[in-house]
Image (cartoon, rainbow, N blue to C red):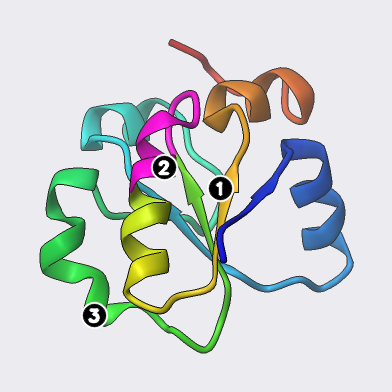
Amino acid sequence: MMQHITPVELKQKLATGFAPVLVDVRERWEFDICHIEDALLIPLHSLADTYQTLDNSRPIVLICHHGIRSQQAAYFLDSAGFEVINLTGGIDAWAHDVDPSMPSY
């Protein structure tokens, strides 16, 4: 079942030991501008070819620019049996609500 999490909730959970796999489904150029530390880059267009390499014993938090592409990735991974959590508002909301020093685009 797909879940959603706000950037503030994710930051709080990460600070208390929550250890999901952070998967950023944006393009390389977007990831190079800004990303959450320790996030894996798997662009949405290549997810179907690479999702088997993900650790399915841990929840996966999906990240994109505003939350649309990550929602698509979440539906795909949920149907493949992964525990998935979509970051509401994406990296843009993370930069606004958690890390204002993060570059935005």
For the point 44% across and 26% down, the residue is 65
Q: For the residues marked 2 and 3, what is the alpha-carbon distance in whole angstroms? A: 17 Å
Q: Quadrant of the N terminus?
A: bottom right
- Is 2 displayed left or right of 77 in the figure? right
User: At numbered mark 3, what does the secondary structure look like: helix, strand or loop?
Assistant: helix
Instruction: State the image quarter where residue 61 is shown.
Output: bottom right
For the point 56% across and 48% down, the residue is 86
User: At numbered mark 2, what does the secondary structure look like: helix, strand or loop?
Assistant: helix
Q: Residue furthest top?
A: 105
Q: Nearer the viewer, residue 103 or 72?
A: 72
The amino acid type, in three-letter code, at marker 2 is Ser
**Region rendered in magenta:** 64-72
Q: Are marks 1 and 3 in contact (CB under 8 Å)?
A: no
Q: Sequence-wise, which precedes: disc 2 or disc 3?
A: 3
For the point 17% across and 69% down, the residue is 50
- The picture places residue 78, in percent across and down from the top left corner, at 42, 66
Residue identifier under label 2: 70
Q: Sequence-wise, which precedes: disc 1 or disc 2?
A: 2
Q: Are marks 1 and 2 in contact (CB under 8 Å)?
A: yes
The amino acid type, in three-letter code, at marker 1 is Asn
Examine the structure image and report whether residue 70 is included in the region drawn in magenta: yes
Residue identifier under label 1: 86
